[in-house]
Image (cartoon, rainbow, N blue to C red):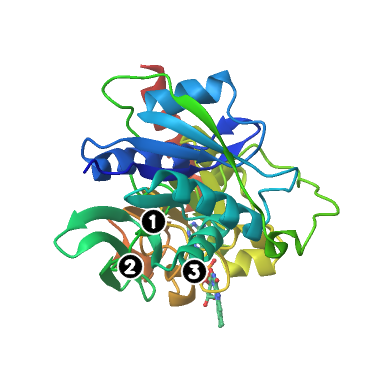
Amino acid sequence: MTQGPVLVVVDHHEGALTPPSTEVLTAARALAAGAAVAAVWLGEEGPGEAAREVLGRFGVSTVHVPELGGLPPQLTAVATEAVAAVVAATSPQAVLLVSTYAGKELAAGLAITVGTGAVVDADRVERRAEGVAAGKTVLGASWETVCAVTGPLPVVALRPAAVDAEPAPAAGEPAVVRVPVELTGRARAVSVVERTEHPTTGQVPLTDAQTVVVGGRGTGGDFTAVEELAELLGGAVGATRDVTDEGWREHSAQVGQTGVTVAPRLYIGVGVSGAVHHTVGMRAAQTVVAVNTDPEAPIFELADFGVVGAAEDVLPQAIETIRTHQRT
Ligand SMILES: Cc1cc2nc3c(=O)[nH]c(=O)nc-3n(C[C@H](O)[C@H](O)[C@H](O)COP(=O)(O)OP(=O)(O)OC[C@H]3O[C@@H](n4cnc5c(N)ncnc54)[C@H](O)[C@@H]3O)c2cc1C
């Protein structure tokens, strides 16, 4: 019997695939081990030419576009029934998603609908004797766990930046297949009356960023150099609670227990003491750099690289060095 495809629910924004989607497609190819990788595109307009090119480059053979009768796929109940219809039509061996809020809700809804299990916030997915298993860090990144989905269809949501995005060895042209969906009363129980996108800063979203530069109280509220460094590295700016309490940054930038959790490749803490309420939100970062005037600051216990010095001295030098490096 041929293996079904690994099905990836891809995220897209303004018609373009998001970077975390290409990471999940990369993980899907490894998991498929030669079987097909298929995508679900939620949005009746379907992928445009540019998006199809990216999907083909990342190894997708078929893109399934559920027909939603005009209902918005942003509603979890609608998205759940749409993906369930693609699952019924394709009998996949696993379903992978991006672990955003929406992705996690969809993973849970899908698992309930098809009677299986889901793992969200995973940082890797692999095949083991027990079945498809997903690794994730838990309890403030103090434990690593591996969970095998024992239900009939593994559903795994992978965190952004957990996997390096790598195109397939050979690009293809994916087929686009429309999938009829019979939406139930549950999917129609809520309607979207209005949607307004908040203006963005043009930065990568904090939780998706591969580099996060966090400014703490030690910045004295001047984020100019923090922003410049983040921009140079293609990253996002975060903040500690002291900073958001002071009103120096929006609460949405707060990293930690009462803010967001980030797990970037590179975390740079500038004038951040490293209080546990903050570090629970960044412990899973792969490489931690700290800049602090106090050599005894707790952040140095976590740091892979530490600079004892004032932010206003260290950051301009770091920025200049990176610029010189980028020019050569
Ligand atoms: C229930 C609860 C929930 C909380 N949730 C969060 C949360 O989600 N996120 C969060 O961040 N905090 C949270 N906190 C607050 C947390 O405990 C700390 O108070 C906070 O993280 C400290 O922020 P900070 O590191 O910016 O400031 P500080 O602890 O004041 O540290 C400032 C650091 O800057 C250094 N410094 C000073 N001048 C310079 C300079 N010129 N250059 C370089 N370094 C300099 C200092 O040596 C010091 O280490 C929470 C607290 C509670 C009680």
Instruction: Say whether marks 1 and 2 touch (CB < 8 Å).
Output: no
First of labels 1, 3 by sequence position: 3
Q: Distance between the residues labelled 1 and 3?
A: 43 Å
Residue in the foreground of this view, choosing between 310 and 76: 76
The image quadrant that residue 215 belongs to is: bottom right
- Dot 1 falls on a residue whose secondary structure is strand
The image shows residue 112, relative to residue 286, as above or below, that is: below
Pointer 1 residue Cβ closer than 8 Å to ligand 1: no
First of labels 3, 2 by sequence position: 3
Q: How far apart are marks 3 and 2 (CA)?
A: 11 Å
In the rendered structure, find residue 151 and report the number of the disc placed on it. 2
Residue type (three-letter) at the residue carrying disc 1:
Ala
The image quadrant that residue 173 belongs to is: top left
Q: How crowded is mark 2: few (under 14 residues within 10 Å), some or many (20 or more)?
A: some
Q: Where is residue 70 in the image (x, y as percent from the top left)?
A: 75, 43
Q: Would you say residue 206 is visible in this rendering? A: no
Pointer 3 residue Cβ closer than 8 Å to ligand 1: no
Residue type (three-letter) at the residue carrying disc 2:
Gly
Residue at (66, 64) in percent of width and height: 244
Q: In which quarter of the image is the N terminus?
A: top left
Residue at (33, 45) in percent of width and height: 163
- Dot 2 falls on a residue whose secondary structure is loop
Instruction: Say whether marks 1 and 3 touch (CB < 8 Å).
Output: no
Q: Name, please, the residue furthest toward the right.
A: 193
Q: Mark 3 points at which residue?
A: 112
Q: Would you say residue 279 is visible in this rendering? A: yes
Q: Mark 1 points at which residue?
A: 290
- Dot 3 falls on a residue whose secondary structure is helix
Q: Position of residue 113 (x, y in %)?
A: 51, 65
Q: Distance between the residues labelled 1 and 2?
A: 43 Å
Residue at (28, 62) in percent of width and height: 135
Residue in the foreground of this view, choosing between 242 and 99: 99
